[in-house]
């Protein structure tokens, strides 16, 4: 257990800088601030089943290790990526033995718990229910979709957020201070004990901005900058050029199969509803540059044209269909301007949900109410026998009377004329 927290020469800088107490932990004030529930749980060592949900580099594993340091329970780290069900059974058997013989509970930390399928997750359930193990799961995916409902109902979910740019800058400054106190601890093979490191504020800002809330990315960039830097008079200065080379091109965080995908398209849709052209273009670029299927975006924009604009500007749907064909014909990156043209048009077009609301009312009656038969006078009558039974009888072309079923006569779905 102790070896897990010792600084090893081969460990990356991010691992060596991992905080070991809540006092050193930066960020997540919404769940770890003074008197917040999660902080009280950790400080009192009254751990309950928890799911830590958040993006990479937000502190999920760090929190687990802080709990491990503080708790009197056995603490077992387990990765859903590298381990399987057989290992879980061994852990649970040992946990049962420890509880029966020594009255000592076991906290099982499962990293990347979403990597287990639903049947594998079921293996935890009996042991969580009877208190043999206290499950502590970490996931970058939405637990609502990736964690079994029975397991989820027995655990408290805490949502960790991307660290702010100020959080990242503070952590980088602290990191440099620690390294300067003992350079050989953090870089035993390349730094002398009297080396001092400095970084320009602009370089610090560049790394903090481009790592997008992932402190691991920020530490990795800092580590690379230090390794690549030239030493002059026992000093290392990290300037803008070195910071840019270290962080390289920004990685756009976007998973086409997970929350980022749905959050981005939702943001695009809502920006267009608000007639916010700039936000619409931002979310379009955010998706396209991250590799989203442009046809998916085009299909959603076709839907927007009919759902949120409708007959207030019928040209919107015509343009949307035309752009969809353009996207299919050209592909990326040539189709980006066509999609941008459509986004701008839809954002500026007059909005109306009248068509969508009218259909929703009609659908509600069809799905939830008894509906009478179609009136005889408007039924199809292709044969003599059907005509004799009254099919089509009395029908008058362009007759403006109600043709609704008898029990819905007088119902108004469309109220825009």
Image: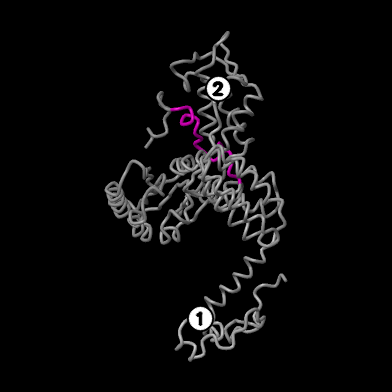
- Identify the element where label 2 is drawn: helix
Compare residues 131 and 204 and report the one nearer the observer: 204
Left or right of 358? Residue 58 is left
Counting from the top left corner in percent of width and height, residue 257 is at 46, 48
Left or right of 57? Residue 311 is right
Location of residue 375 (image quadrant): bottom right
Sequence-wise first label, 2 or 1: 2
Counting from the top left corner in percent of width and height, residue 198 is at 61, 19
Local crowd size for mark 2, using a 10 Å CA cut-off: few (<14), some (14–19), many (≥20): few
Residue name at image x 43 percent, y 42 percent: 68
User: Residue 16 lies in magenta, yes or no?
Assistant: yes
Q: How is the image coloured?
A: one colour
Local crowd size for mark 1, using a 10 Å CA cut-off: few (<14), some (14–19), many (≥20): few
The residue at which mark 1 appears reads as 380
The label on residue 245 is: 2
User: Distance of mark 2 from mark 1, alpha carbons?
Assistant: 73 Å
Q: Main secondary structure of the magenta part?
A: loop
Q: Which residues are magenta?
A: 12-29
Q: Nearer the viewer, mark 2 or mark 1?
A: 1
Residue name at image x 68 percent, y 62 percent: 311
Quadrant in which the C terminus appears? bottom right
């Amino acid at each position: 257990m102790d070896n897990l927290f010792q600084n090893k020469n081969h460990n990356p800088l991010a691992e060596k800088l991992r905080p070991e107490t809540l006092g050193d932990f930066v960020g997540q004030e919404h769940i770890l601030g003074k008197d917040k529930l999660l902080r009280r749980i950790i400080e009192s060592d009254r751990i309950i089943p928890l799911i830590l949900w958040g993006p990479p580099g937000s502190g999920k594993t760090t929190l687990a290790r802080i709990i491990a340091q503080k708790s009197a329970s056995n603490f077992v780290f387990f990765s859903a990526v590298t381990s399987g069900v057989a290992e879980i059974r061994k852990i649970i058997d040992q946990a049962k033995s420890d509880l029966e013989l020594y009255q000592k509970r076991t906290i099982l930390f499962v990293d990347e718990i979403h990597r287990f399928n639903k049947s594998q997750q079921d293996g935890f359930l009996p042991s969580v229910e009877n208190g043999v193990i206290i499950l502590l799961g970490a996931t970058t995916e939405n637990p609502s979709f990736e964690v079994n409902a029975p397991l989820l109902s027995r655990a408290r979910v805490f949502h960790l957020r991307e660290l702010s740019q100020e959080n990242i800058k503070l952590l980088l400054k602290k990191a440099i201070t620690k390294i300067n106190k003992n350079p050989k601890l953090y870089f035993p093979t390349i730094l002398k004990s009297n080396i001092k490191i400095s970084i320009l504020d602009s370089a610090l800002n560049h790394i903090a901005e481009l790592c997008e809330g992932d402190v691991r990315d920020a530490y990795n960039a800092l580590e690379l900058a230090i390794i690549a830097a030239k030493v002059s008079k026992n000093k290392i200065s990290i300037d803008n050029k070195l910071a840019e080379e270290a962080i390289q091109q920004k990685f756009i965080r976007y998973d086409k199969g997970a929350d980022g995908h749905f959050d981005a398209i939702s943001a695009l849709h809502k920006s267009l509803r608000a007639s916010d052209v700039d936000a619409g273009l931002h979310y379009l670029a955010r998706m396209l540059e991250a590799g989203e299927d442009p046809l998916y975006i085009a299909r959603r924009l076709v839907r927007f044209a009919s759902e949120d604009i409708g007959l207030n500007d019928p040209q919107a749907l015509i343009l949307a269909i035309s752009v969809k064909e353009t996207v299919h014909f050209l592909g990326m990156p040539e189709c980006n301007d066509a999609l941008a043209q459509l986004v701008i048009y839809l954002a500026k077009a007059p909005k109306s949900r009248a068509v969508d609301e009218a259909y929703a009312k009609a659908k509600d009656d069809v799905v939830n109410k008894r509906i009478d038969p179609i009136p005889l006078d408007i039924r199809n009558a292709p044969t003599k026998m059907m005509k004799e039974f009254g099919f089509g009888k009395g029908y008058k072309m362009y007759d403006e009377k109600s043709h609704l079923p008898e029990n819905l006569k007088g119902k108004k779905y469309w109220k825009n004329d």
